[in-house]
Image: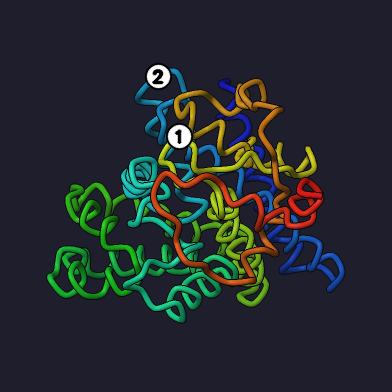
Amino acid sequence: MPLNVLILLLSFVATWGCLWVASHLSLGFALLAVWLFSLIANTPFALMHEAVHGVGCASPRRNEWLGIVCGWAFPTSFSMQRLAHEGHHQRNRTDQELYDYYLPHQSRLMRNLWLYTGNLLGLYWWSVVLGNVLYLLAPWAYRSRFFVERYAPALGFESYIADLAKLPVLRVWSEIALAFAYQALIFYSLDLNVFWTLACYGAFALHWSVLQYADHAWSAREVRSGAWNLKVLPPFRWIALNYHYHLAHHQYPNVPWYKLPSLVDPSVRQPSFWRVYFSLWKGVRPAPPMGAPADLAFLFPAAEQESHR
């Protein structure tokens, strides 16, 4: 059995266990299960990320199925995720994808609202899932003029929506339907509690949403090098399949997760996940020009002052 398939199966079983414990055992065990779920649910997403880059399985067909099944856990469409992520690698740190800064024509208040609610309070994940519900119920809405030209720009997703509207409707709809069918099946089979199930996914939403930008915030305004290799405790990095080594990934996007540690340059500064996380609560800042280096003085103010003494 391929390694990634085995990891996916283990992660599915682990998330089922967390959901069951949260729904059926005492408060202390439930809270522990919620926390563990918020971590372990990143594993299927990380494997879907591998499949997006074509390195999930050696066979293209198996790689495709790996991505689709991983999407069930999120839940989302693999085709949508692949297109969105490919767009991310093209637009990273450009004016079209910049959440830690605001541009001269943008409202600082609105940009802070997107940063706090979207990345720091978990709305990013909820918006993806609710967007999938909309696609399931009314796939034509993604192609409507109102959605593409007014709604998506208001949320800062205009580039993504314009791309996603070009995908084959039946394929995307089928993948989303399978994902929600999987979610309904485990909810019914494990006799889950609605409150604690939402608590598990809410905790995952908080973790996943901030991780999607903590590995980019305040980094260089460069498409290929605008990311960080974040410092986290090894067990947490292993669960996420080295997803925190995001700079190495952006520099070598077709390298599988288990080879990324060998590509991390030890001479390049690595901020901790928590340092970036807490810095984001200070809010957005005026955007430097494209090509500007990483804002190390903002992330490491004490160290910067020490170097100038």
Q: In which quarter of the image is the N terminus?
A: top right
State which quadrant residue 131 falls in: bottom left
The amino acid pointed to by label 1 is Leu
Estimate the spatial distance between the alpha carbons at disc 1 and disc 2, rounded to whole Å.
Answer: 10 Å
Residue at coordinates 43% horizontally, 67% vertically from top-left?
102
Residue 270, percent from left and from top: 69, 40
Residue at coordinates 65% horizontally, 58% vertically from top-left?
298
* Label number found at residue 113: none
Report the residue marked by disc 2.
59
Residue 259, percent from left and from top: 61, 21
- Name, please, the residue furthest toward the front: 309
Residue at coordinates 61% horizontally, 26% vertically from top-left?
260
The reply to whether the C-beta atoms of the residues labelled 1 and 2 are less than 8 Å apart is no
Residue 175: tell me if it is visible.
Answer: yes
The amino acid pointed to by label 2 is Ser
- Name, please, the residue furthest toward the bottom: 109
Residue 9: tell me if it is visible.
Answer: no
- Name, please, the residue furthest toward the top: 58
Report the residue marked by disc 1.
66
Tag 2, which secondary structure?
A: loop
